[in-house]
Image (cartoon, grey):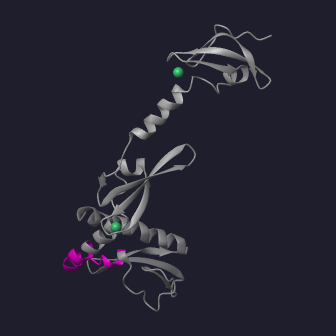
């Protein structure tokens, strides 16, 4: 015969055996630190399922709800509606209206951390501005936006990557400030693509950052 009297389970202290059973389990009258008394079964107490009269869950729930982003603005996004969803633990999503009219959903964290500033239109606009600004500068930034047509003779189908049949190698290059910069020859097409990607980062990103 188990005796839990005097034992503590979370916020609950067992004060006596209850008269009734819960299911087939013995039940116990417990005093919660908040002042309430409840009855809980042996199994729920010992497994940790019951740790309070319910006050603990209410506190956790109110902590989640305390973040209220309604009406708040994050860059171009205005939070217009709460959309609670059950994803793993309870996650709150927010319906946001972008200045351009698009509606997007983001969770609390993404918004408060500043990771979402628009529906995606901000990046597109930035890029367009950048291309306009840098057209004068002679930097072929339209390569980032992939607006240039790929040369018909380009067997790779990827900008900046071409097949050098005389050497039987893939070559990678990048256009920067109206100059073609040679990035190397590769046996492997993937290596050529990687070299090109690295170069895009190296040459274009500082300009992207500068023009932010
Ligand atoms: Zn309580
Ligand atoms: Zn937008």
Q: Main secondary structure of the magenta part?
A: helix
Q: Quadrant of the C terminus?
A: bottom left
- 129 or 167, which lies in front? 129
Q: Residue furthest left?
A: 136
Residue in the picture at 43% in, 55% down: 106
Residue 25, given in percent of the width and then of the height, sits at: 77, 21
| Quadrant showing the N terminus | top right
- Range of residues picked out in magenta: 130-144
Instruction: Pick the residue in front: 195 or 97.
Output: 97
- Residue placed farthest to the front in the image? 19
Among the 4 quarters of the image, the one containing residue 173? bottom left
The spot of residue 120 in percent (x, y) is 37, 66
Residue plotted at (46% across, 92% down): 152
Instruction: Relative to 73, say whether 38 is above or below.
Output: above
**Residue 13 picture quarter:** top right
Residue 195 part of the magenta segment: no
- Residue 23 lies, with reference to residue 64, above or below; the image says above
* Residue 136 is inside the magenta segment: yes
56 left or right, relative to 208: right
Q: Residue at x 23, y 79 (%)?
A: 135
Q: Nearer the viewer, residue 161 or 48?
A: 48
* Circle count: 0
The image quadrant of residue 117 is bottom left
* Towards the viewer: 44 or 111: 44
The outermost residue toward the top is 6
Percent position of residue 86, x then y: 56, 48
Q: Is residue 2 left or right of residue 117?
A: right
Q: Is residue 140 left or right of residue 85?
A: left
The residue located at (51%, 26%) in the rendering is 55
């Amino acid at each position: 015969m188990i005796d839990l009297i005097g034992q503590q389970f979370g916020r609950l202290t067992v004060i006596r055996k209850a008269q009734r059973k819960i299911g087939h389990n013995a039940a116990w009258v417990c005093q919660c630190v908040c002042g309430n008394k409840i009855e809980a079964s042996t199994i729920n107490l010992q497994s940790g399922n019951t740790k309070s009269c319910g006050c603990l869950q209410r506190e956790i729930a109110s902590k989640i709800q305390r973040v209220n982003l309604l009406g708040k603005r994050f860059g171009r996004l205005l939070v217009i509606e709460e959309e609670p969803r059950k994803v793993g633990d309870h996650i709150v999503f927010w319906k946001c209206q972008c200045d351009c009219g698009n509606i997007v959903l983001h969770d609390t964290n993404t918004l408060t951390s500043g990771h979402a500033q628009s529906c995606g239109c901000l990046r597109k606009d930035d890029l367009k501005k950048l291309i306009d600004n840098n057209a004068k500068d002679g930097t072929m930034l339209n390569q980032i936006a992939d607006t240039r047509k790929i040369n018909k003779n380009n067997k790779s189908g990827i900008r900046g990557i071409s097949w050098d049949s005389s050497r039987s190698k893939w070559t990678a290059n990048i256009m920067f400030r109206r100059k073609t910069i040679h990035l190397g020859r590769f046996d492997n097409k993937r290596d050529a693509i990687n070299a090109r990607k690295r170069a895009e980062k190296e040459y274009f990103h500082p300009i992207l950052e500068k023009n932010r």
